Amino acid sequence: MTLLLMPPAMSVTGAVILTVVLLLVAAAIGSVTTRLYAKSKYTPVIKKLEEEKSGLQMQVENLNDDIRNLEKKINSLNSDVIGLEKQIETLEENAAGLKKTIAGKESQIKELKKKLKE
């Protein structure tokens, strides 16, 4: 049986060229087959990873929203603390004034007791 591509009397140069052409065709077939195999094997993996990525992106967005809400709450609490500190200062001033008033009243009571004894 004779090959259809190779004529019976072929020169060395022709045989080399034919061999190189056949090797290039085999390489092209191999690369196409490899691409198709890799695509069929890794496509589900890539889809799964993309789904996980979108899920993680949603989690990141939710966490960023939580951070913004917590920052607002912190600012609100800080303003509450400032207001309460002002109230403490006012109450301390009132307490100091009341202590002075009590001291004055006690001195008046002592004077009145002295007058009663006389």
Image: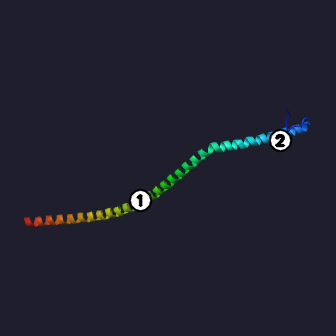
Describe residue 8's horizontal placement relative to residue 33 as left or right.
right
Count the labels in the image. 2
- Please state which of residues 31 and 89 is positioned toward the viewer in this rendering: 31
Residue 5: quarter of image = top right
Across and down, in percent, residue 108 comes to 16, 67
* Residue at left offset 20%, top offset 64%: 102
- Please state which of residues 70 and 21 is positioned toward the viewer in this rendering: 21
- Please state which of residues 81 and 21 is positioned toward the viewer in this rendering: 21
* Residue at left offset 11%, top offset 65%: 114
Residue 73: mark? 1
Mark 2 secondary-structure assignment: helix
* Residue at left offset 58%, top offset 48%: 47
Describe residue 79's horizontal placement relative to residue 50 as left or right.
left
* Image quarter in which the C terminus is found: bottom left
Across and down, in percent, residue 84 comes to 34, 62
* Image quarter in which the N terminus is found: top right
Question: Separation of disc 1 and disc 2 at Cα?
Answer: 74 Å
Question: Is 43 drawn above or below residue 95 in the view shown?
Answer: above
Q: Amino acid at mark 2?
A: Val
Of badges 1 and 2, nearer the viewer stands 2
Which residue is tagged 2? 21
